[in-house]
Amino acid sequence: MSHLVNWSRRGEWLELIPGKAISSAGDPDTAVLDWLLHSAQMPEKLLKRLKHEKKIQWKGDRIQLHLFPSQPLGIAPVWQELEILYEDDFCLVVHKHVGMPIHPDGRAGLVTLDHVVAAHYEATGQEVAVRHIHRLDLDTTGPVLYAKNEWAQLKLDEDMRHKRIERKYVAFVEGNVKQSLSVIDLAIGKDRHHPQRRRISSTGQTAITHVQLEEIFKEVSLVRLRLETGRTHQIRVHLSHVGHPLVGDALYGGHTTIMTRQSLHGERLAFTHPITQEYIEIDDPWPEDMLELYDLLRA
Protein backbone atom coordinates (compact mmCIF):
# COMPACT_ATOMS: atom_id res chain seq x y z
CA MET A 1 0.00 0.00 0.00
CA SER A 2 1.68 3.21 -1.13
CA HIS A 3 1.51 6.41 0.92
CA LEU A 4 1.61 9.86 -0.60
CA VAL A 5 2.76 11.16 2.78
CA ASN A 6 5.38 9.17 4.71
CA TRP A 7 4.31 9.14 8.37
CA SER A 8 4.57 7.22 11.61
CA ARG A 9 3.40 7.64 15.19
CA ARG A 10 5.80 8.27 18.07
CA GLY A 11 3.65 8.18 21.20
CA GLU A 12 1.67 11.41 21.24
CA TRP A 13 3.60 12.77 18.24
CA LEU A 14 3.09 12.35 14.52
CA GLU A 15 6.34 12.10 12.58
CA LEU A 16 6.45 13.11 8.93
CA ILE A 17 9.38 12.76 6.54
CA PRO A 18 9.19 15.35 3.75
CA GLY A 19 12.75 14.63 2.60
CA LYS A 20 15.01 17.29 1.14
CA ALA A 21 12.10 19.71 0.70
CA ILE A 22 12.93 21.01 4.20
CA SER A 23 16.59 20.21 4.86
CA SER A 24 17.75 21.91 1.66
CA ALA A 25 15.47 24.95 1.95
CA GLY A 26 16.97 28.40 2.44
CA ASP A 27 14.35 29.23 5.09
CA PRO A 28 13.50 25.91 6.76
CA ASP A 29 10.94 27.39 9.19
CA THR A 30 8.84 28.75 6.34
CA ALA A 31 9.43 25.61 4.28
CA VAL A 32 8.08 23.40 7.09
CA LEU A 33 4.82 25.34 7.31
CA ASP A 34 4.46 25.52 3.53
CA TRP A 35 5.06 21.77 3.13
CA LEU A 36 2.57 20.89 5.89
CA LEU A 37 -0.12 23.10 4.40
CA HIS A 38 0.29 22.28 0.70
CA SER A 39 2.03 18.91 0.36
CA ALA A 40 0.70 17.15 3.45
CA GLN A 41 -2.61 19.06 3.12
CA MET A 42 -2.75 19.65 6.86
CA PRO A 43 -5.89 21.55 7.93
CA GLU A 44 -4.97 25.23 8.21
CA LYS A 45 -6.88 25.63 11.49
CA LEU A 46 -4.84 22.85 13.10
CA LEU A 47 -1.59 24.16 11.66
CA LYS A 48 -2.18 27.62 13.15
CA ARG A 49 -3.04 26.20 16.56
CA LEU A 50 -0.03 23.88 16.77
CA LYS A 51 2.25 26.66 15.57
CA HIS A 52 0.88 29.03 18.22
CA GLU A 53 1.28 26.38 20.93
CA LYS A 54 4.82 25.54 19.71
CA LYS A 55 3.87 21.93 19.09
CA ILE A 56 5.57 21.67 15.71
CA GLN A 57 9.18 20.46 15.81
CA TRP A 58 11.59 19.73 13.01
CA LYS A 59 15.13 18.49 12.64
CA GLY A 60 16.90 17.47 9.46
CA ASP A 61 14.35 15.79 7.21
CA ARG A 62 11.79 15.00 9.96
CA ILE A 63 8.82 16.97 11.26
CA GLN A 64 6.99 16.12 14.46
CA LEU A 65 3.50 17.33 15.42
CA HIS A 66 1.79 16.87 18.77
CA LEU A 67 -1.28 15.28 17.17
CA PHE A 68 -2.17 12.50 19.59
CA PRO A 69 -2.59 14.07 23.06
CA SER A 70 -4.54 12.04 25.61
CA GLN A 71 -8.21 13.01 25.45
CA PRO A 72 -11.29 11.99 27.44
CA LEU A 73 -13.70 9.66 25.64
CA GLY A 74 -16.51 12.18 26.09
CA ILE A 75 -19.07 9.42 26.67
CA ALA A 76 -19.34 6.52 29.11
CA PRO A 77 -18.04 3.23 27.66
CA VAL A 78 -20.56 0.37 27.43
CA TRP A 79 -19.16 -3.01 26.43
CA GLN A 80 -20.90 -4.82 23.57
CA GLU A 81 -19.55 -6.78 20.64
CA LEU A 82 -18.29 -4.39 17.95
CA GLU A 83 -17.62 -5.31 14.34
CA ILE A 84 -14.62 -3.29 13.12
CA LEU A 85 -14.36 -2.86 9.35
CA TYR A 86 -11.28 -0.60 9.29
CA GLU A 87 -8.98 1.03 11.83
CA ASP A 88 -5.72 2.96 12.04
CA ASP A 89 -4.46 5.96 14.07
CA PHE A 90 -6.68 8.37 12.10
CA CYS A 91 -9.92 6.56 11.29
CA LEU A 92 -12.27 3.89 12.57
CA VAL A 93 -15.10 2.31 10.57
CA VAL A 94 -17.56 0.04 12.40
CA HIS A 95 -20.74 -1.81 11.48
CA LYS A 96 -23.98 -0.48 12.97
CA HIS A 97 -26.59 -3.10 13.78
CA VAL A 98 -30.34 -2.66 13.36
CA GLY A 99 -32.02 -0.86 16.25
CA MET A 100 -28.89 0.87 17.56
CA PRO A 101 -28.77 4.68 17.55
CA ILE A 102 -25.51 6.43 16.75
CA HIS A 103 -25.48 8.85 19.69
CA PRO A 104 -27.49 9.61 22.87
CA ASP A 105 -30.76 11.50 22.60
CA GLY A 106 -31.42 12.20 26.27
CA ARG A 107 -33.20 8.93 27.12
CA ALA A 108 -31.84 7.29 30.26
CA GLY A 109 -30.11 3.95 29.85
CA LEU A 110 -29.96 4.13 26.05
CA VAL A 111 -26.91 2.30 24.65
CA THR A 112 -25.62 3.85 21.42
CA LEU A 113 -22.87 3.08 18.95
CA ASP A 114 -20.84 5.93 20.46
CA HIS A 115 -20.96 4.16 23.85
CA VAL A 116 -19.72 0.92 22.31
CA VAL A 117 -16.95 2.66 20.36
CA ALA A 118 -15.87 4.30 23.64
CA ALA A 119 -15.60 0.84 25.20
CA HIS A 120 -13.44 -0.32 22.28
CA TYR A 121 -11.09 2.64 22.74
CA GLU A 122 -10.88 1.98 26.48
CA ALA A 123 -10.26 -1.75 26.06
CA THR A 124 -7.47 -1.14 23.55
CA GLY A 125 -5.80 1.60 25.60
CA GLN A 126 -6.66 4.43 23.21
CA GLU A 127 -7.22 7.79 24.92
CA VAL A 128 -9.29 9.15 22.06
CA ALA A 129 -12.44 11.29 21.98
CA VAL A 130 -15.41 9.59 20.31
CA ARG A 131 -16.26 11.54 17.13
CA HIS A 132 -18.63 10.10 14.52
CA ILE A 133 -18.51 11.76 11.08
CA HIS A 134 -21.95 10.77 9.78
CA ARG A 135 -25.09 9.00 10.97
CA LEU A 136 -27.49 6.23 9.98
CA ASP A 137 -31.17 5.90 10.92
CA LEU A 138 -32.03 3.73 13.92
CA ASP A 139 -33.07 0.69 11.85
CA THR A 140 -30.62 1.17 8.97
CA THR A 141 -27.56 -1.05 9.07
CA GLY A 142 -24.13 -0.32 7.61
CA PRO A 143 -20.72 1.27 8.16
CA VAL A 144 -20.16 4.37 10.31
CA LEU A 145 -16.97 6.44 10.12
CA TYR A 146 -15.20 7.87 13.18
CA ALA A 147 -12.30 10.34 13.35
CA LYS A 148 -9.59 9.60 15.93
CA ASN A 149 -7.72 12.92 16.04
CA GLU A 150 -8.21 16.59 15.16
CA TRP A 151 -6.53 16.31 11.74
CA ALA A 152 -8.88 13.48 10.75
CA GLN A 153 -11.97 15.22 12.10
CA LEU A 154 -11.30 18.49 10.28
CA LYS A 155 -10.53 16.76 6.97
CA LEU A 156 -13.42 14.30 7.10
CA ASP A 157 -15.94 16.95 8.21
CA GLU A 158 -14.84 19.07 5.25
CA ASP A 159 -15.19 16.11 2.89
CA MET A 160 -18.71 15.49 4.21
CA ARG A 161 -19.67 19.12 3.58
CA HIS A 162 -18.32 18.95 0.03
CA LYS A 163 -19.94 15.56 -0.70
CA ARG A 164 -16.60 13.78 -1.13
CA ILE A 165 -17.45 10.85 1.15
CA GLU A 166 -19.31 8.27 -0.91
CA ARG A 167 -22.08 6.21 0.67
CA LYS A 168 -23.80 3.43 -1.26
CA TYR A 169 -26.86 1.56 -0.07
CA VAL A 170 -28.92 -1.44 -1.08
CA ALA A 171 -32.67 -1.64 -0.48
CA PHE A 172 -35.80 -3.63 -1.24
CA VAL A 173 -38.65 -1.36 -2.31
CA GLU A 174 -42.30 -1.94 -3.10
CA GLY A 175 -43.45 -2.10 -6.71
CA ASN A 176 -41.58 -2.51 -9.97
CA VAL A 177 -39.04 0.28 -10.34
CA LYS A 178 -38.48 1.49 -13.90
CA GLN A 179 -35.00 1.58 -15.38
CA SER A 180 -35.60 5.24 -16.21
CA LEU A 181 -35.66 6.15 -12.50
CA SER A 182 -32.01 7.07 -12.05
CA VAL A 183 -31.97 10.32 -10.03
CA ILE A 184 -34.37 11.80 -7.48
CA ASP A 185 -33.65 15.50 -6.99
CA LEU A 186 -36.27 16.80 -4.57
CA ALA A 187 -35.75 19.08 -1.57
CA ILE A 188 -36.65 17.71 1.85
CA GLY A 189 -38.02 19.53 4.89
CA LYS A 190 -39.67 18.76 8.23
CA ASP A 191 -43.25 17.53 8.36
CA ARG A 192 -45.16 20.00 10.56
CA HIS A 193 -47.88 17.42 11.24
CA HIS A 194 -45.56 14.58 12.32
CA PRO A 195 -42.41 15.26 14.41
CA GLN A 196 -40.65 12.05 13.30
CA ARG A 197 -41.28 12.40 9.58
CA ARG A 198 -39.71 14.41 6.79
CA ARG A 199 -41.43 15.36 3.54
CA ILE A 200 -40.77 16.74 0.09
CA SER A 201 -40.78 20.54 0.39
CA SER A 202 -39.94 23.26 -2.11
CA THR A 203 -38.53 25.31 0.80
CA GLY A 204 -36.53 22.40 2.24
CA GLN A 205 -32.87 21.45 1.85
CA THR A 206 -31.49 20.19 -1.45
CA ALA A 207 -31.52 16.39 -1.58
CA ILE A 208 -30.23 14.18 -4.40
CA THR A 209 -30.40 10.38 -4.49
CA HIS A 210 -29.03 8.26 -7.36
CA VAL A 211 -30.99 5.06 -8.07
CA GLN A 212 -29.91 1.91 -9.90
CA LEU A 213 -32.36 -0.94 -10.50
CA GLU A 214 -30.74 -4.34 -9.86
CA GLU A 215 -33.51 -6.94 -9.84
CA ILE A 216 -37.30 -7.19 -9.96
CA PHE A 217 -39.36 -9.70 -8.00
CA LYS A 218 -43.11 -10.04 -7.63
CA GLU A 219 -44.24 -6.62 -6.37
CA VAL A 220 -40.76 -5.83 -4.98
CA SER A 221 -37.58 -4.40 -6.54
CA LEU A 222 -33.96 -4.55 -5.41
CA VAL A 223 -32.19 -1.22 -5.91
CA ARG A 224 -28.81 0.26 -5.15
CA LEU A 225 -28.62 3.87 -4.09
CA ARG A 226 -25.93 6.52 -3.83
CA LEU A 227 -26.37 9.65 -1.74
CA GLU A 228 -25.14 12.95 -3.12
CA THR A 229 -26.52 14.71 -0.04
CA GLY A 230 -27.25 13.39 3.43
CA ARG A 231 -30.60 14.67 4.66
CA THR A 232 -32.51 13.00 7.47
CA HIS A 233 -34.51 10.03 6.11
CA GLN A 234 -33.48 11.06 2.58
CA ILE A 235 -33.69 7.66 0.89
CA ARG A 236 -36.90 6.78 2.69
CA VAL A 237 -38.62 10.07 1.81
CA HIS A 238 -37.48 10.09 -1.82
CA LEU A 239 -38.48 6.52 -2.62
CA SER A 240 -41.81 6.83 -0.83
CA HIS A 241 -42.58 10.01 -2.76
CA VAL A 242 -42.03 8.32 -6.14
CA GLY A 243 -44.29 5.41 -5.16
CA HIS A 244 -41.68 2.90 -4.00
CA PRO A 245 -41.49 2.96 -0.19
CA LEU A 246 -38.94 0.69 1.42
CA VAL A 247 -40.23 -2.74 2.34
CA GLY A 248 -40.86 -2.71 6.09
CA ASP A 249 -40.81 1.11 6.42
CA ALA A 250 -44.16 1.71 8.12
CA LEU A 251 -43.36 5.39 8.79
CA TYR A 252 -43.32 6.13 5.05
CA GLY A 253 -45.98 3.75 3.78
CA GLY A 254 -44.11 0.45 3.47
CA HIS A 255 -45.73 -2.86 4.42
CA THR A 256 -44.29 -4.90 7.28
CA THR A 257 -45.58 -8.36 6.39
CA ILE A 258 -42.27 -9.72 5.11
CA MET A 259 -39.91 -7.37 7.00
CA THR A 260 -40.45 -5.44 10.20
CA ARG A 261 -37.85 -2.69 9.68
CA GLN A 262 -36.95 -0.62 6.66
CA SER A 263 -34.92 -2.87 4.34
CA LEU A 264 -32.01 -0.45 3.91
CA HIS A 265 -28.35 -1.32 4.34
CA GLY A 266 -25.21 0.74 3.84
CA GLU A 267 -23.25 -1.52 1.53
CA ARG A 268 -20.15 0.60 0.89
CA LEU A 269 -18.37 3.60 2.38
CA ALA A 270 -15.54 5.29 0.49
CA PHE A 271 -13.40 8.24 1.56
CA THR A 272 -9.99 9.84 1.04
CA HIS A 273 -7.71 9.05 3.95
CA PRO A 274 -7.01 12.27 5.89
CA ILE A 275 -3.22 11.97 5.74
CA THR A 276 -2.15 9.29 3.25
CA GLN A 277 -4.59 10.76 0.67
CA GLU A 278 -5.38 7.21 -0.46
CA TYR A 279 -8.92 6.36 -1.54
CA ILE A 280 -10.29 3.87 1.01
CA GLU A 281 -13.28 1.67 0.09
CA ILE A 282 -15.03 -0.27 2.85
CA ASP A 283 -17.59 -2.95 2.01
CA ASP A 284 -20.10 -4.06 4.65
CA PRO A 285 -21.79 -7.43 3.94
CA TRP A 286 -25.57 -7.66 4.02
CA PRO A 287 -27.11 -8.36 7.45
CA GLU A 288 -28.85 -11.68 8.02
CA ASP A 289 -32.41 -10.35 7.77
CA MET A 290 -31.81 -8.86 4.33
CA LEU A 291 -30.17 -12.05 3.09
CA GLU A 292 -33.21 -13.98 4.31
CA LEU A 293 -35.55 -11.54 2.57
CA TYR A 294 -33.59 -11.93 -0.68
CA ASP A 295 -33.86 -15.72 -0.48
CA LEU A 296 -37.58 -15.44 0.24
CA LEU A 297 -38.20 -13.19 -2.74
CA ARG A 298 -36.17 -15.36 -5.10
CA ALA A 299 -38.06 -18.46 -3.94
Image (cartoon, rainbow, N blue to C red):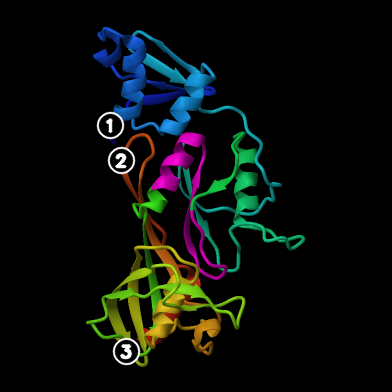
Identify the mark at residue 4; answer none if there is no mark.
Answer: 1
Please, what is the three-letter code of the amino acid marked with disc 1? Leu
The percent position of residue 228, horizontal first and vertical second, equals: 34, 63
- Residue name at image x 54 percent, y 19 percent: 53
User: Can see residue 295?
Assistant: no
Q: Which residues are magenta?
A: 134-158
Query: Which residue position is annotated with label 3?
Result: 176
Element under disc 3: loop
Q: CA distance from mark 3 to mark 2?
A: 39 Å
Please, what is the three-letter code of the amino acid marked with disc 3? Asn
Which numbered disc flags the more N-terminal residue, 1 or 2? 1
Identify the mark at residue 163; answer none if there is no mark.
Answer: none
Q: CA distance from mark 3 to mark 1?
A: 46 Å
Residue most extreme to the front:
203
| As drawn, 291 above or below 155 | below
User: Can see residue 155?
Assistant: yes
The percent position of residue 167, horizontal first and vertical second, equals: 38, 60
In this rendered view, identify the residue nearer to me: 278 or 215: 278
Query: Is there a contact, CB below 8 Å, between mark 1 and mark 2?
Result: yes
Residue most extreme to the right:
108
Crowd tier of the residue under label 1, counting other residues whose Cα lies within 10 Å: few below 14, some 14–19, many 20 or above: few
Query: Which residue position is annotated with label 2?
Result: 278
Q: Is 86 contained in the magenta span?
A: no
Element under disc 2: loop
Horizontal placement of 224 versus 98: left or right? Answer: left
Crowd tier of the residue under label 2, counting other residues whose Cα lies within 10 Å: few below 14, some 14–19, many 20 or above: some
Which numbered disc flags the more N-terminal residue, 3 or 2? 3
Q: Is 141 contained in the magenta span?
A: yes
Q: CA distance from mark 1 to mark 2?
A: 7 Å
| As drawn, 167 above or below 146 | below
Please, what is the three-letter code of the amino acid marked with disc 2? Glu
In this rendered view, identify the residue nearer to me: 121 or 68: 68
